[in-house]
Amino acid sequence: MTEHADDRTVVSEHYGRGDLAARILAALRAAGKVPDALAADDLAPVDQFHTRGKDATLELARLAGVTPEMRVLDVGGGLGGPARTLASEIGCSVEVLDVTEEFCRAGEMLTTRTGLGDLVSFRHASALDMPHSDASFDAVWMQHSSMNIADKERLFAEIQRVLRPGGHLALHEIMAGPVAPIYFPVPWARGPEINFLRPPEEVRALITGTGFEELAWMDETASALRWFRERLAAADAASGELPPLGLHLVLGADLGQMFRNLARNLQEDRAVVVQGVFERP
């Protein structure tokens, strides 16, 4: 199945919520932060758009061997949470590629305000037609970004193309479990129209069939489910009152239902979370 312009429009509409940058700045002020002097960690409630947050990003970075001299492409990197984490904690250069233009605009603003503009940049484009020359990057990063991409064959072919020989693909992704269907809404889709999960064994075979060599592959579902349960318990303890700064700024008022459904999907084997690292020979 191929990604069409209509799919990209629906994906952008799912994530785009008006003037996101202005709303994040207002929320930062309400949370007691100084918008002109931000640390990367100040943005964690709104830009760590994946299970287990910063811990998962740094864990994957260690597994993939990310080092300061590397040039990294973050495919579907959204507001740039993982990119700023990699830049601030490791010192590498990261380009975020995202199909949602509003994410790129807000991400650039936040990156400037964290003082990381010399290391983190943003490009509005499709992952299926990357505006980069061959062998441009030392690593390609994917953290909860493939769920909205139907044409995974073309996706991994493009990733292989832009990776230099010996470069690594690092992924931390939600994939289809053995039980179907999943419950909606979930953070990446309110319905099946832009939900393109595939089983992990199919994705794993596709990546190696594209020419990659597998270095690591592990099921992270149990730790992801624990993380979601902790977040849901904390939300219940807060009596449903939303903090000023959070993912509801991006996903809307039904964030709680999205989280509950995703936890249920993980619990009932309707979705799984996988971490992997592959090398381009």
Image (cartoon, rainbow, N blue to C red):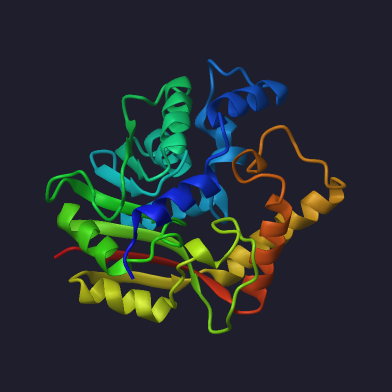
Where's the C terminus, which quadrant? bottom left
* Residue plotted at (34% across, 58% down): 4
The image position of residue 43, as x and y in percent, is: 57, 33
Looking at the picture, tell me which residue is in the foreground, 197 or 280: 197
Above/below status of 105 relative to 77 = above
Q: How many marks?
A: 0
Looking at the picture, tell me which residue is in the foreground, 185 or 205: 185
Q: In the rendered image, which quarter is residue 183 located in?
A: bottom right
* Residue plotted at (50% across, 54% down): 56
Looking at the picture, tell me which residue is in the foreground, 115 or 105: 105
Please say whether residue 57 is visible from this viewpoint.
no
Above/below status of 148 relative to 252 = below
The image position of residue 280, as x and y in percent, is: 18, 63
Above/below status of 34 relative to 185 = above
Q: Residue furthest front?
A: 6
Q: In the rendered image, which quarter is residue 89 located in?
A: top left
Above/below status of 87 relative to 10 = above
Q: Residue furthest bottom?
A: 178
Where's the N terminus, which quadrant? bottom left
* Residue plotted at (13% across, 50% down): 135
Left or right of 230 in this view: 193 = left
Please say whether residue 142 is visible from this viewpoint.
yes
The image position of residue 177, as x and y in percent, is: 53, 78
* Residue plotted at (53% across, 84% down): 178
The image position of residue 7, as x and y in percent, is: 41, 56
Left or right of 139 in this view: 222 = right
Left or right of 115 in this view: 204 = left
